[in-house]
Image (cartoon, rainbow, N blue to C red):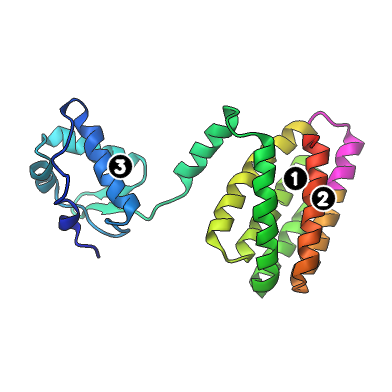
Amino acid sequence: MSDVYSAFQQKSTSVQPQKASVAIYEQIRSKILSGELKPGDKLPAERDLIEMFQRSRPTVREALRMLENKNYVSISRGRGTTVNKLSTDEIERTLSSLVRLNLVSEENILDIRTVCETLAISLAAQNRTEQDIRVLENILEGGDQSDSFEQSIGSGIQFNGAIAKASHNEMLYLIIRITSSFSHDKLIGNGSKMALEEKKRIAKMISTQHHEMLEAVIAQDCERAVALNRRHLQGVAGTFYNI
């Protein structure tokens, strides 16, 4: 575990009085994000934090509640305050807000998807395990058995995430999971305007492409997997985004 107390020895008294709880929150949060405080570390006891920050008990407690609400720490009676392993929830919420406010364009998302999914499927073809293959096969089987356009698209998005997972690169998996969720909303929204037969045709096309991509991954044919993935993304762009 980190030397938790030493992490609080620097800059712990530079708290602005008008927003003391927020300033304490930001200082502790920055120590967590920088790695000074690691998952499993315990924060100093409440009375020690009061002394370190030279603030009242209600102010320190409010700062700790803010950290707990954002899932940076867990507070337990008898065990104190423990630093949590960081999740991607806040990152996803921030990026989602950018898209919904039209601060990130559809073209931006497709560009990122093309770059990241191309790399992911190449790595998946190299690194996939038998367990990865079974997960991918089950996802496609579930999509094929559904008559619902929405469920078919959902299975396709799950397939993208599972390919990223099979790359065994956690950063790629995170990015693709986020961008895929945006794409899912767009595909469902645009698909709702299509005739039933067109929906069936598109669902069949996407399923066929995904099966071909999986075959290439199983065969560990990186070049073919990449080519098939690019063709798939071009088709999605043309069908749903008019790009």
Q: Is residue 93 magenta?
A: no
Label 2: how many Cα within 10 Å (few below 14, some 14–19, many 20+): some
Dot label at residue 67: 3
For marks 3 and 2, the one nearer the N-term is 3
| 138 left or right, relative to 32 | right
Q: Are marks 1 and 2 in contact (CB under 8 Å)?
A: yes
Q: Is residue 145 visible?
A: no
Q: Secondary structure at mark 1?
A: helix
Query: 138 or 160, which is in the foreground?
Result: 160
What residue did someone put label 1 on? Answer: 153
Location of residue 141 with respect to 189 vertically, above or below: below
Q: Secondary structure at mark 3?
A: helix
For marks 1 and 2, the one nearer the N-term is 1
The stretch of residues the image draws in magenta is 192-204
Q: Is residue 224 visible?
A: yes
What residue did someone put label 2 on? Answer: 206
Q: Name which residue lies at 14% across and 51% down.
A: 9
**Residue 17 % position (x, y):** 15, 28
Q: Residue type at mark 2? A: Ile
Q: Residue type at mark 3? A: Leu
| 204 left or right, relative to 123 | right
Query: From the image, which quarter does the N terminus lie in?
Result: bottom left
Label 1: how many Cα within 10 Å (few below 14, some 14–19, many 20+): many
What whole-number distance in Å separates the C-alpha atoms at marks 1 and 3? Answer: 37 Å
For marks 1 and 3, the one nearer the N-term is 3
**Residue 13 % position (x, y):** 13, 40
Q: Is residue 200 magenta?
A: yes
Q: Secondary structure at mark 2?
A: helix
